[in-house]
Image: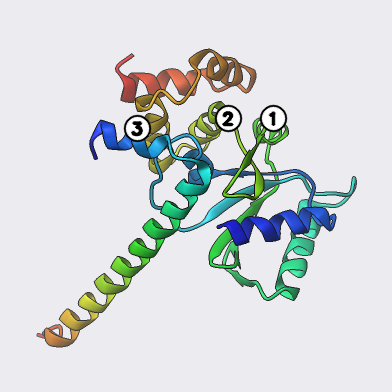
Amino acid sequence: MSDERRKRLASLSFGEKLKLLEKLRDRSLLLAEARKKLAEKKKKDNPERRG
Amino acid sequence: MKDTLEIINQMQADGVIGKYAIGGAVGATFYLEPSATLDVDIFVVLPGPSQSSLVSLSSIYEYLTKRGCKPEGEHIVIETWPVQFLSPNGMLEKEALSEAIQTDAGGVSTWVLKAEHLVAIALQTGRKKDHARILQFFEQKAVDRDKLHKILARHGLLTKWTNFKKRFLDE
């Protein structure tokens, strides 16, 4: 993130920042869910070989 | 978050908790650019002179679960946010809570720990994410160094601070 963008975000009101926090949280949860599904799919497609 | 804070304010008005203040990543967001976090840390003064913190925290849970909030590990989910209530542990956190500043969060009144206290608590806690947050405060010049130094001296954290500066700030 550029310094300019960080400064602009830091200068927002607390209320506006809290709204952004919710968006960031929702995005993090969505990405975590997608990663989990991807890992499960990989596991299913490539079951561990047993010797 | 606004709904979450309104419920906490109501809980305060109902006498379940005394003064409270937002700490952690959400508290830091008051001073810095927002960065992703999944929960909210709330420092609370627990009413009643002789109650143990465990008993009083259970009264918070009782109050909130009656209103449909669900406990989730160390947190309780208020509206959509997992909230961790923390009874101040030690003199630094007690001072931080007593000196917290009142602010407005989109039309809801709330309290946030001062920047210098957030940094001092992060230094005391000392996890990687705490160190990263301290660096953010310095990069964005969001902390008053003199005030921070006085707090660190008062709470015996100057050695830790010297080590932190050597390691991360090239000082």
Which sits earlier in the primary sequence, circle 1 or circle 2? 1
Left or right of B70, for residue A51: left
Whether B66 is drawn above or below A44: the answer is above
Q: Are marks 3 and 2 on the same chain?
A: no
Quarter location, residue B95: top right
Camera sees residue A47 = yes
| Residue drawn where x is 37% and y is 32% of the image | B136
The three-letter code of the residue at mark 2 reads His
Left or right of A9, for residue B57: right
Disc on res. A7: 3
The three-letter code of the residue at mark 1 reads Glu
C-alpha span from label 1 to label 2:
9 Å
Q: Are marks 1 and 3 in contact (CB under 8 Å)?
A: no
Left or right of B153, for residue A18: left
From the image, state whether disc 1 or disc 3 is nearer to you. Answer: 3
The three-letter code of the residue at mark 3 reads Lys
* Badge 1: residue crowd in 10 Å (few <14, some 14–19, many ≥20): some
Query: Element type at marker 2?
Result: helix
Q: Which residue is mark 2?
A: B117
Disc on res. B99: 1
* Badge 3: residue crowd in 10 Å (few <14, some 14–19, many ≥20): few
Q: Chain of mark 2?
A: B
Residue A1 placement (x, y as % from top left): 24, 40
Q: Are marks 1 and 2 in contact (CB under 8 Å)?
A: yes
**Is B3 or B95 nearer to us in this picture?**
B3
Q: Chain of mark 1?
A: B
